[in-house]
Image (cartoon, grey):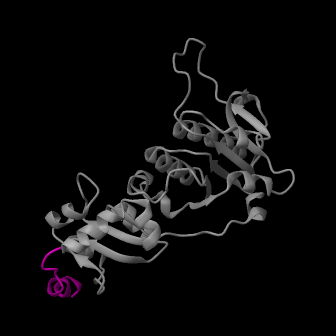
């Protein structure tokens, strides 16, 4: 029944206005003005549909049929060729969706009772997307971003999260102000080449883990608010690499925090 009704609602052609509108959402200014972001591929769109309603779905008949969804008035059924005109991907996969940009409420009292990640000026979309995915993997539900960190709703970031953007609350704020407002005694960890070996340090089950810019690390302004500086040592002294990629470093640190928590329990 759904499949036959979809055939009646098949779009004649993707309009130039729709192509222009979708492509405008590649830019942060347009995303902010419209209040929406683009997600692509069945995996990412399905994960987002599990937690929020799409303002518009643009997909092939096969995708709508497989999902058992009857397209709404605002949805668009497209061919693979039409989807390629709209997509930001080199190889589009069946569906793209427009979703409202969420604005989760920041609660300092809650932050003091959980483990969260804060990013100070992280710029690369791929790194940001991977960090969101890492947070999801290790059960960290809050990611705090400085106002000059890359936009998490950039299509490249959304794609790099592989659906994890549906499960992590992402909050942009004045990071220094947020750290100053934490409950007394809340540990603030930060990575530094002059920090203490993470494997020899006591780690708490709550607090903030601050990760810095790809090239310059944590800014002096934020580092002055870090209460525990951590360092990930190389396997041996002959290692030629001078540092780890910020997304990889985040994964290593989160894994160690969660390992300690699991061992305690």
**Which residue occupies 49% across, 72% down?**
51
Residue 5 part of the magenta segment: yes
* Residue 47 visible: no
Query: Which one is nearer the viewer's eye here, 236 or 9?
Result: 9
Q: Describe residue 210's horizontal placement relative to residue 71 as left or right.
A: right
Write down the quadrant of residue 158 in the picture: bottom left
**Which residue occupies 87% across, 54% down?**
184
Q: Quadrant of the N terminus?
A: bottom left
Residue 130 part of the magenta segment: no
**Which residue occupies 16% across, 81% down?**
10
Residue 241 place in picture, x, y as percent? 52, 21
Q: Is residue 57 above or below residue 183?
A: below
Q: Which residues are magenta?
A: 1-14
Residue 76 place in picture, x, y as percent? 24, 77
Q: Is residue 67 above or below residue 220?
A: below
Residue 2 place in picture, x, y as percent? 23, 85
Q: Describe residue 166's horizontal placement relative to residue 118 as left or right.
A: left
Q: Residue furthest right?
A: 184
Q: Describe residue 252's horizontal placement relative to residue 65 as left or right.
A: right
């Amino acid at each position: 029944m759904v499949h036959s009704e979809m055939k009646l609602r098949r779009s004649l052609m993707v309009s130039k206005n729709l192509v222009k509108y979708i492509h405008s959402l590649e830019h942060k200014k347009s995303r902010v003005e419209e209040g929406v972001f683009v997600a692509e591929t069945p995996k990412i769109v399905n994960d987002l549909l599990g937690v929020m309603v799409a303002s518009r779905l643009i997909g092939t008949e096969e995708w709508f049929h497989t999902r058992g969804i009857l397209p709404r008035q605002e949805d668009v059924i497209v061919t693979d060729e039409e989807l390629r005109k709209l997509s930001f991907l080199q190889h589009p996969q069946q569906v793209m969706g427009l979703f409202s940009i969420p604005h989760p409420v920041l609660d300092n009292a809650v932050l003091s009772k959980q483990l969260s990640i804060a990013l100070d000026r992280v710029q690369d979309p791929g790194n940001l997307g991977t960090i969101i995915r890492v947070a999801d993997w290790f059960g960290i539900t809050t990611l705090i971003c400085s106002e000059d960190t890359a936009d998490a709703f950039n299509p490249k970031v959304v794609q790099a999260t592989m659906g994890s953007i549906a499960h992590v609350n992402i909050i942009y704020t004045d990071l220094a102000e947020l750290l100053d407002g934490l409950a007394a005694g809340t540990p603030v960890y930060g990575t530094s080449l002059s920090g203490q070996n993470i494997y020899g340090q006591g780690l708490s089950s709550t607090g903030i883990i601050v990760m810095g810019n790809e090239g310059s690390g944590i800014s002096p302004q934020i580092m002055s608010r870090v209460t525990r500086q951590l360092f990930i040592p190389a396997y041996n002294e002959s290692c030629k690499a001078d540092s780890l990629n910020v997304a990889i470093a985040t994964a290593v640190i989160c894994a160690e925090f969660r390992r300690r928590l699991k061992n305690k329990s």
